[in-house]
Image (spheres, rainbow, N blue to C red):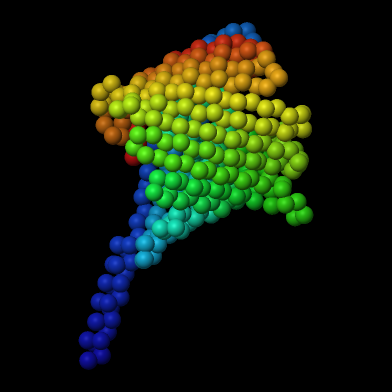
Amino acid sequence: MNNTIRSACALLCGLCASAAMAQSSVTVYGIVDSGLVYTTNINAAGDNILKMPSLTSSFPSRIGFRGTEDLGNGLQAFFVLENGFGLDSGAIGQGNRLFGRQANVGLKGAFGTFTLGRQNNMTYLAPQKADVLGPNLFAIGSIDGYLPNSRSDNAIGYLGVFSGVTVGATYSTGRDTSAAGGPAATNCAGEVAGNSKACRQVTGMLAYDTKAFGVSASYDVLYGNTGAAGGLSSSANTDKRTTLNGYAMLGATKLGAGIIARELNAVTGPSDSNLYYFGVSHPLTPAVVIDAQVAKRDTKDSPNDVTFMAARATYNFSRRTAVYAAIGQMKNKGTSAVALDAGGTVGAGKTQNGLMGGLRHMF
């Protein structure tokens, strides 16, 4: 009898373990994407260059791990660990963070999703459906490097979708712990005793989507602190972005447009600008897609405006593998020095033209 009981208990434990395993899953995913880019006027002498880009090509390269566990009653626990890297050298991206693209854990249910950790904030999410070029090497992210890098350390986030309406927000107690430099790392760790604003960040989003059209609006305010980059060396300094984005479908053709209003209150003084963009995406065939976009950054009380245009053609061998080519131009006025290619350089006041092409594989 004792042996029978022990065998039954062992069988029951095995079944329970199998059921628990069936309720959990871990997925490995990623993108490997690289190519070559040729740009003109990379310096004051007007030199040209041919190179392999580091930050992005058509999409930034990455490898990620996503896990979920079914907790019952429609509730799920999840985690995301996502590493970004440069395919040109294999170097870690996002300010030398191991999981610089995302590193978070959360709960998801009918109420929405709550997330803790480093995560994409609402400025990252709001323009995604309207911006037809997204994180492409030639895109509006070249004008405002924060847009494709709008992530927050030490953050709690919420995102909910209810009958086509999406609401979301993040709050960070220390928005950026990396001091490696660049738009993805601005050295503002925060969580300073006695200073409730030091390196804090708040973002929010409201959106409505249907199959035919969608609109979204977002707000983002970053506070500075001693040692932070971007002219935000005091918690009294702020960098605010308000976006309004929209898209409409005309058959298979997507039209996307938006405005990103920025108010920078830096140690060097205030600076306000508006970034306008408009794009079109059209599938010529099931395998060939054409994207085109124009944009302009208008800086208040300044001659240093920027005008951008680019077009891209993508041929999809399959759902995972594609080749692409793009052409673009960045026209700098005054002393503006915004490079056409993300992470590149240009001579002040010069117009930069560029060509790029590459190969992308997703897994």
Q: Is residue 111 above or below residue 198?
A: below
Which corner quadrant of the image does residue 307 belong to?
A: top right
How many callouts does the rendering have?
0
User: In x, y percent, where is residue 306?
Assistant: 59, 17
- Whether 159 is drawn above or below 213: the answer is below
Visible residue check, residue 92 = no
Identify the residue at image location x=36%, y=66%. 72
Q: Nearer the viewer, residue 337 or 132?
A: 132
| Residue 328, position as x, y percentages in the image | 47, 16
- What residue is rendered at 42% in x and 50% in y? 162
- Looking at the image, which is closer to me, 206 or 329? 206
Pinpoint residue 355: horizontal percent, then vertical percent.
Answer: 44, 15
Task: Name the residue nearer the viewer: 96 or 119.
Answer: 119
Q: Quadrant of the C terminus?
A: top left
Q: Is residue 184 above or below residue 166?
A: above
Q: Position of 277 compared to 214: left or right? A: right
Q: Position of residue 240 (x, y in %)?
A: 64, 36
Q: Is residue 346 left or right of residue 230?
A: left
Residue at x 52%, y 38% (from the top left corner): 217
Res. 130 image quadrant: top left
Can you see residue 282? yes
Q: Is residue 118 left or right of residue 130?
A: right
Q: Quadrant of the N terminus?
A: bottom left
Name which residue lies at 76% across and 41% down: 236
